[in-house]
Image (tube, rainbow, N blue to C red):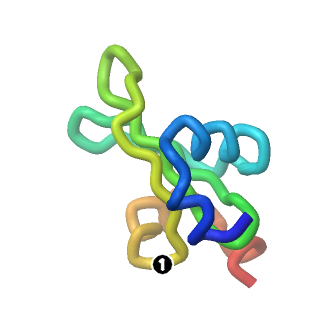
Amino acid sequence: MNLYDFNHKNHEKRIALIRTQGEFLAVRVSNYYVIKLYSVDKFFAEIWYRGENCEVGLVRGFTGIALLEPYLEMVDLSEITE
């Protein structure tokens, strides 16, 4: 699975891929969202859950280090970014 293919799937298929192929790395809270970070093959993925009802608001894959900034103090990424 590459990032392009992942991002062109619908939310349900992205979630299924994350759950079967992803490795959970961290969780954070931002405003009304609980955001879970995963490593999937050669990219990262986030699932954004909305507040109390835990409805999925966003599922995205990315490779950019800038999007990892909120996690840098929480996770040792050296093994999976080499």
Residue in the picture at 55% in, 35% down: 12
Question: Looking at numbered disc 1 in the image, what kind of residue is underneath it?
Answer: Ile
Side (left or right) of 55 relative to 81:
left
Side (left or right) of 76 relative to 70:
right
Is the residue marked by circle 1 packed among few (<14), some (14-19), or many (20+) residues within 10 Å?
few
Q: Which of 4 and 55 is in front in this view?
A: 4
Q: Which residue does the numbered mark 1 point to in the structure image?
A: 65
Number of labels in the image equals: 1
Residue in the picture at 75% in, 84% down: 82
Residue in the picture at 66% in, 45% down: 18
Q: Where is residue 16 in the image (x, y as percent from the top left)?
A: 67, 37
Q: Quadrant of residue 53?
A: top left
Q: Where is residue 48 in the image (x, y as percent from the top left)?
A: 40, 41
Q: In which quarter of the image is residue 20?
A: top right
Side (left or right) of 27 relative to 22:
left
Q: In this view, does 60 lie above or below 12?
A: below
Q: Nearer the viewer, residue 13 or 43?
A: 13
Q: Position of residue 41 (x, y in %)?
A: 75, 65
Q: Quadrant of residue 32?
A: top left
